[in-house]
Amino acid sequence: MAKKGGIAGISKGDCRIFLTDGAFREKEEVDELYKIWSASQAKVVSQPESKPWKLHEFTVADLDGNLFRVFYDFSRDA
């Protein structure tokens, strides 16, 4: 695992997952990632929405049915 500038990546073969700290991501990045994944015909489970629990999020599924929730925590904006 490598870490640089608020982002960490874990890789095995052709598979990669990236994790970021709060300072790295913004709400607009969640919406942009949704657009990119939707255009690539990813299996979108839920569209981006700002939830009452202070997360702006969407969910996608991989081919095995694993769910990935992508979110921005806007509770820190208050």
Image (cartoon, rainbow, N blue to C red):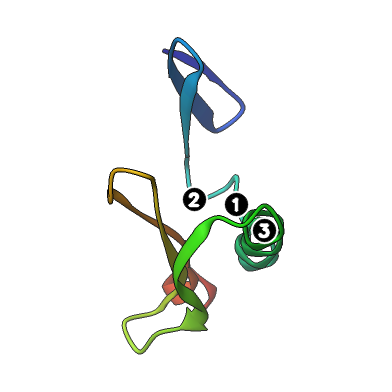
Q: Nearer the viewer, residue 16 or 56?
A: 16
**Depth-wise, is mark 2 or mark 3 nearer the camera?**
3
Q: Position of residue 46 (x, y in %)?
A: 43, 75
**Quadrant in the rendering for residue 39:** bottom right
* Neighbourhood count class around disc 1 (C-alpha, 10 Å): few under 14, some 14–19, many 20 upward: some
Q: Secondary structure at mark 3?
A: helix
Q: Position of residue 40 (x, y in %)?
A: 67, 52
In this rendering, would 17 be left or right of 67? right
In this rendering, would 10 be left or right of 25? left
Q: Are marks 2 and 1 in contact (CB under 8 Å)?
A: yes
**Depth-wise, is mark 1 or mark 3 nearer the camera?**
3
Marks 2/3: CA–CA distance: 12 Å
Q: Residue at x 70, y 64 (%)?
A: 35
The disc labelled 1 sits on which kind of residue? Arg
* Neighbourhood count class around disc 3 (C-alpha, 10 Å): few under 14, some 14–19, many 20 upward: some
Q: Are marks 1 and 3 in contact (CB under 8 Å)?
A: yes
Q: Position of residue 22 (x, y in %)?
A: 49, 50
Marks 1/3: CA–CA distance: 6 Å
In this rendering, would 15 be left or right of 23? left
Q: Position of residue 12 (x, y in %)?
A: 40, 12
Image quarter where the N terminus lies is top left
Q: Nearer the viewer, residue 23 or 72?
A: 72
| Label 2 vs 3, first from the N-terminus | 2
The disc labelled 3 sits on which kind of residue? Glu
Q: Which mark is drawn over residue 29?
A: 3
The disc labelled 2 sits on which kind of residue? Gly
Marks 2/1: CA–CA distance: 6 Å
Q: Residue at x 62, y 67 (%)?
A: 27
Identify the residue under disc 2.
22
Q: Which mark is drawn over residue 25?
A: 1
